[in-house]
């Protein structure tokens, strides 16, 4: 389905954005708290990147630490482009909201109305796609993560995958669902995703450093950050190649200043209005220390990203090119930096030398609670893991006999043995003072 190009796009280009007139008024006490928060993570090599805290159009505090390139020659800045991962979903959702508010689609429209051929498409609504309750199946091949596939090919791959669950009966975070939303944007607007994004958001808000990462699977943009993964006892492991962009889901790169400008544009309600919606599509509602906000976070191979828009006018952005478990703490930690509270510190774990052979731990492990198998592989003196068809590997460090730790996401893996000493499975949990929320796996 194609409709006439949205008429208000040209008028929006005339908007004067405050991004062009950023003012800085350093809050020295806030800057000290932010520095104190970031410093131990930088020393532990768990963070490299930028953090920005602002109120309205005033920059209050920021840090820029580490290096943007594998050789370690150039430091990042507030205008260094980073892969922003699932922060891209907030842009996609806003495009859909824009089209709905201008009458080109309804949140109750079915997927099949715009994209035929998807399992359960006649029963899936746009609202369900936006809220991750549509039950779209997951990719069963690594190609989308390794090759910069055009949208047509991504949609064709999704069409071949069986549905995950009946629409509306469950919720499961879905990149595939947001890829389909990108196709809906194209069908409803009559423009390519990139062109519509440029006309309604990027140009009006002067977001000049935000772009579709068209070659992200091969190399970063010139001047952009290159990704790495945190490991114990050494510098982050540089990822050999960037994860390919999934248009609509994780396909954008941007800068801290652009994301600040983007959030201010959304809050102004001049480009899109979220106030009438029962759910902030593309965002999550939270309340930290009595301060309500909308936030979104993201993670792809070697990168982490976070943005928050507080109801009382504060904004926070974090962009990192070291993938570590610190990413899961940015929301509450930055609220604590802003408003006073307890902040996290690097986990109190240390790698140990093990006399045991890693080869006996290698293999495939399956859990009834998780669709994809967990694959353990020995590489030299280190154990690595990956999930199903996802092609990227995560380094593990030994912290005890049959116990390994991932600095990439703070997961603990404890191998299980039978009475004869044979490895029969493992348990995976999160470490945060104590291990909790364990998931059991059986060796295949």
Image (spheres, helix red, strand yellow):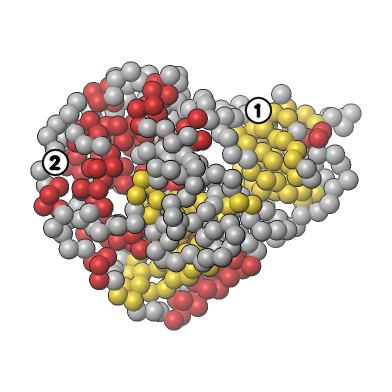
Q: Is residue 329 visible?
A: no
Can you tell which mark lies on residue 6? 2
Q: What residue does disc 1 label?
A: 366
| Direction from residue 106 to residue 408 in the image, left or right | right
Q: Residues within 10 Å of mark 2 (few under 14, many from 20)?
A: some
For the residues labelled 2 and 1, the Cα–Cα distance comes to 48 Å
Q: Are marks 2 and 1 in contact (CB under 8 Å)?
A: no
Q: Is residue 360 visible?
A: yes
Q: Residue at x 15, y 59 (%)?
A: 15
How far across and how far down the image is residue 33, in percent?
50, 74
Q: Quadrant of residue 56?
A: bottom left
Mark toward the start of the polypeptide (2 vs 1): 2
- Relative vertical location of residue 379 with respect to residue 338 in this rendering, above or below: above
Nearest the eye: 224 or 19: 224
Q: Residues within 10 Å of mark 1 (few under 14, many from 20)?
A: some
How far across and how far down the image is residue 190, in percent?
19, 34
């Amino acid at each position: 389905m194609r409709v006439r190009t949205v008429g208000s796009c040209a008028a929006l280009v005339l908007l004067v954005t405050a991004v062009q007139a950023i003012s800085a008024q350093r809050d020295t006490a806030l800057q000290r708290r932010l520095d104190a928060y970031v410093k131990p993570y930088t020393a532990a090599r768990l963070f490299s990147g930028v953090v920005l805290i602002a109120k309205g159009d005033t920059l209050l505090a920021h840090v820029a630490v580490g290096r943007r390139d594998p050789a370690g020659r150039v430091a990042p800045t507030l205008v260094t482009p980073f892969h922003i991962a699932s922060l891209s979903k907030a842009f996609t959702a806003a495009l859909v909201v824009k089209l709905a508010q201008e009458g080109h689609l309804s949140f109750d429209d079915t997927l099949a109305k715009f994209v035929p051929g998807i399992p359960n498409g006649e029963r899936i609504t746009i609202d369900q796609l936006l809220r991750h309750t549509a039950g779209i199946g997951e990719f069963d091949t690594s190609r989308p993560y390794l090759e910069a596939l055009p949208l047509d090919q991504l949609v064709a791959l999704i069409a071949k995958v069986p549905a995950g669950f009946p629409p509306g009966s469950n919720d499961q975070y879905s990149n595939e669902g947001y890829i389909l939303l990108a196709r809906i944007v194209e069908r409803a607007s009559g423009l390519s995703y990139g062109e519509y994004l440029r006309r309604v958001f990027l140009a009006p808000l002067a977001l000049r450093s935000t772009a579709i990462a068209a070659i992200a699977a091969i190399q970063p943009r010139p001047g952009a950050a290159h990704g790495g993964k945190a490991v114990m006892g050494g510098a982050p492991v540089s990822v050999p190649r960037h994860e390919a962009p999934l248009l609509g889901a994780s396909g954008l790169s941007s800068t801290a200043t652009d994301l600040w400008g983007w959030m201010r544009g959304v809050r102004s309600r001049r480009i899109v209005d979220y106030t009438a919606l029962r759910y902030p599509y593309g965002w999550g509602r939270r309340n930290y220390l009595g301060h309500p906000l909308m936030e979104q976070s993201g993670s792809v191979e070697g990168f982490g990203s976070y943005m928050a828009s507080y109801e009382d006018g504060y904004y926070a952005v974090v962009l990192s090119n070291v993938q570590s478990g610190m990413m899961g703490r940015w929301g509450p930690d930055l609220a604590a930096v802003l408003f006073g509270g307890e902040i996290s510190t690097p986990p109190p774990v240390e790698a140990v030398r093990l006399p045991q052979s890693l080869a006996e731990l290698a293999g495939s492990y399956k859990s009834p609670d998780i669709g994809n198998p967990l694959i353990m592989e020995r590489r030299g003196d280190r154990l690595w893991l990956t999930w199903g068809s996802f092609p990227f590997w995560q380094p593990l460090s030994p912290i005890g006999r049959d116990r390994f730790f991932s600095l990439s996401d703070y997961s603990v893996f404890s191998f299980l043995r039978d009475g004869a000493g044979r490895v029969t499975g493992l348990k995976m949990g999160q470490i945060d003072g104590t291990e909790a929320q364990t998931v059991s796996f059986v060796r295949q």
